[in-house]
Amino acid sequence: PPLVARSLAEALPFADGSAATLVSLEVIEHLDDDLTALAEYRRVLRPAGILLITVPAYQWLWGDHDVTAAHRRRYGARQFRNVVEAAGFEVLEATSYFSFLVPPAFLVRRTPIGRLVGASEDEASSIHPVVDRLFEAMGAAERRVARSRAIPFGLSLAIVARRPHPR
């Protein structure tokens, strides 16, 4: 059976160099010290191990959703890359995603339209079947583009990084 463990990101219950791959989706933005968690990820990964990590983008989009979700920060692309590299990882690929959600997020979070449309705590919930299908199609198109090039902006950021071999 698969191993399931519950722990803090800063203190993973795994031996040094025991993982070939580590996936951290929307975790480190919740932590006071993201670098400590990234260093722990590096400890657990074996040399040449792969890290896939995602975070929310754009501090200027900070809103009630972030407070409700207990975020400590949103990241800029350079800031995200810098913290991953500061933890000792080699960034292999970096991209944004959910680019098509930036305009509606801006409108809902930064203009009076948010009050008019009744923005809720759960911004990721279903809006309307037609809108849901539109977003699904836009997401599929974005994934096709992302296969060949990095997406330059989006509501979230993703990095694929490698733990280097010791020298």
Image: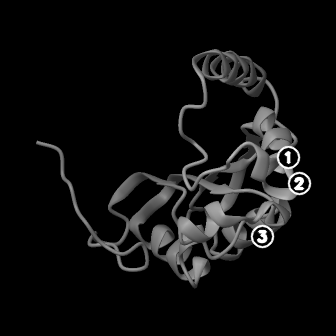
Q: Amino acid at mark 3?
A: Asn
Q: In the rendered image, is residue 17 in sight?
A: yes
Q: Where 43 falls versus 136 (above or below)?
A: below
- Closer to the camera: disc 3 or disc 2? 2
Q: Nearer the viewer, residue 73 or 122?
A: 122
- In which image quadrant can residue 150 be found? top right
- Which mark sits nearer the N-terminus, 3 or 2? 3
CA separation, marks 1 and 3? 29 Å
On the image, the x and y values in percent for residue 10 come to 43, 79
- Which mark sits nearer the N-terminus, 1 or 3? 3
CA separation, marks 1 and 2? 5 Å
- Contact between marks 3 and 2 (CB within 8 A): the answer is no
- Contact between marks 1 and 2 (CB within 8 A): the answer is yes
Classify the position of the N terminus by image quarter: top left
**Badge 1 is on which residue?**
107
Q: Where 18 falls versus 141 (above or below)?
A: below
In the figure, is residue 57 to the left or right of 49?
A: right
On the image, the x and y values in percent for residue 102 come to 81, 43
- Going by the picture, which residue comes out furthest to the front? 116
**Badge 3 is on which residue?**
82
Q: Amino acid at mark 2?
A: Thr
**Badge 2 is on which residue?**
111
Specify few, some or many for label 2: CA neighbours under 10 Å numbering under 14, 14-19, or 20 or more: few
Q: Nearer the viewer, residue 132 or 7?
A: 132
On the image, the x and y values in percent for residue 153 come to 85, 43
Q: Nearer the viewer, residue 159 or 92?
A: 159
